[in-house]
Image: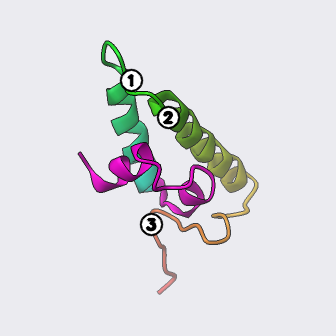
Amino acid sequence: MNALLTSCLEGELDPVQGLAKLSVAELNFLADALFRLLDVGKPEFGVKSWYDAVLDELAARGERSGRGEGPTPGGRSAVEVSSD
């Protein structure tokens, strides 16, 4: 299992501040990995909550991006674009 996914499931990553610090690529990875864990007969306790939190963070970033606000403070974009 990936270290990022493990840190979520073992309570090492804060569900609010920790997710805010992840890149969009990392959030997408987590959403996919958590969805796969939900797609089993009896998912581990907490997986659904983490999946919902990741989707909420992605949605919030989409709303901020739509308003032209950019990433959260301390957050980072998945791709840095330079005007060079």
Q: Amino acid at mark 1?
A: Leu
Residue appearing at x 39%, y 34% in the figure: 34
Q: Quadrant of residue 33?
A: top left
Q: Which residue is mark 2?
A: 51
Q: Which residue is mark 1?
A: 38
Can you tell which mark lies on residue 52? none
Residue appearing at x 62%, y 40% in the figure: 56
Q: Quadrant of residue 1?
A: top left
Percent of width and height locating residue 51: 49, 34
Q: Quadrant of residue 45?
A: top left
Residue appearing at x 49%, y 80% in the figure: 82
Q: Magenta residues, as a range?
A: 1-24
Give the spatial CA distance, label 1 vs label 2. 9 Å
Q: Earlier in the sequence, mark 1 or mark 2?
A: 1
Q: Which residue is mark 3?
A: 79
Cβ–Cβ under 8 Å for marks 1 and 2? yes
Vertical side of 77 occupied by 26: above or below: above
Residue appearing at x 63%, y 52% in the figure: 16
Percent of width and height locating residue 73: 67, 70
Is residue 53 located in the magenta-colored stretch of the structure? no
Q: Earlier in the sequence, mark 3 or mark 2?
A: 2
Classify mark 1: helix, strand or loop.
Answer: helix
Is residue 22 located in the magenta-colored stretch of the structure? yes
Q: Is residue 44 left or right of residue 13?
A: left
Q: Is residue 25 left or right of residue 56?
A: left
Q: Earlier in the sequence, mark 3 or mark 1?
A: 1
Residue that lies at the very extreme toward the bottom in this rendered image: 84
Q: Amino acid at mark 3?
A: Val
Classify mark 3: helix, strand or loop.
Answer: loop
